[in-house]
Amino acid sequence: MTRRGNGVLLGIFFILAGILFLLRNVLPISFGTVIITIAGIELLTAHFYNKSLLALILGSYFTYWGILHIIQLDSLMYSALAASAIFFIPAIIFAILFITQRKRGQLTWLCLFMLLGFDTLLNRLTGIDTIGTLLICVGIALVLDYLLGGTYALTSRLQLGIFLIICGILKLTDWRTYMLYVIPSALIWIGIVLLVRAASKGE
């Protein structure tokens, strides 16, 4: 790492240490939480200089859990955010990768993990159907990937995304007869595909 990078890391370290130790005067923050949070942000900053994937992964993990322990939350919200960490932490990783590398696939994965994280959070807080919203999240991510591609051809990824969204919406209506909705979903999906193909040929 360059001398400039070392200076930036050292400066961030002292600023964070000062802020977090000030917060300890008004919030019940443990010394371990302070160390983990500082280490996480330092590792994330280091990633921008040495492009270390290990630093990015550990930094995302430490930062998420450190901030989660600093913020004062009730037990329900804390448990929901803790359960959502399995998706939110990869979302942080792909967000930083996209900022540094600008690859479309990274943005697609970011959208997917972010949607799944919010889905898990919502399910934990409200108790709504998990499978239906999960299908919708995956479907939206596939459609977003199609839109980000810029080709606007009728790809199998777009077709699968639309189908999963339809299945998810129908699944949310009545879980007891979900299997009866699969065939209507498939028929609606085929109809949309045929309409899009007909419109593209017309152009």
Image (cartoon, rainbow, N blue to C red):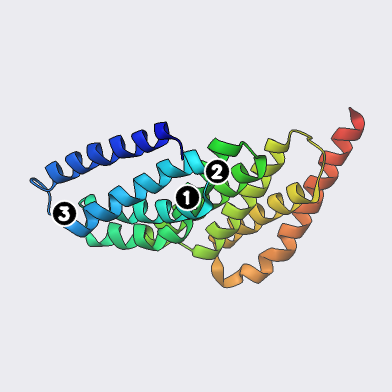
How many angstroms separate mark 1 from mark 2 (CA)?
9 Å
Residue 108 on image: x %, y %: 62, 45
| Residue at horizontal 16 percent and vertical 54 percent from the top | 29
> What numbered label is drawn on residue 29?
3
> What numbered label is drawn on residue 6?
none
| Residue at horizontal 32 percent and vertical 51 percent from the top | 39
Amino acid type of the residue that numbered disc 2 sits on in the rendered structure: Leu
Q: Are marks 1 and 2 in contact (CB under 8 Å)?
A: yes
> What numbered label is drawn on residue 97?
2
Front residue of 142/71: it is 71
How many angstroms separate mark 3 from mark 2 (CA)?
30 Å
Q: Considering only order in the chain, which callout, 2 or 3, is on the residue closer to the N terminus? A: 3
Question: Given the current orientation, which residue lies at the most extreme left position?
Answer: 25
Q: Considering only order in the chain, which callout, 1 or 3, is on the residue closer to the N terminus? A: 3
Amino acid type of the residue that numbered disc 1 sits on in the rendered structure: Leu
Q: At numbered mark 2, what does the secondary structure look like: helix, strand or loop? A: helix
The residue identified by callout 1 is: 56
Q: Considering only order in the chain, which callout, 2 or 1, is on the residue closer to the N terminus? A: 1
Does 192 sit above or below residue 176?
A: above
Amino acid type of the residue that numbered disc 3 sits on in the rendered structure: Ile
Front residue of 100/123: it is 100
Which picture quadrant has residue 163?
A: bottom right
**Disc number lying in front (3 or 1):** 1
Mark 2 crowdedness (10 Å alpha carbons): few <14, some 14-19, many ≥20: many
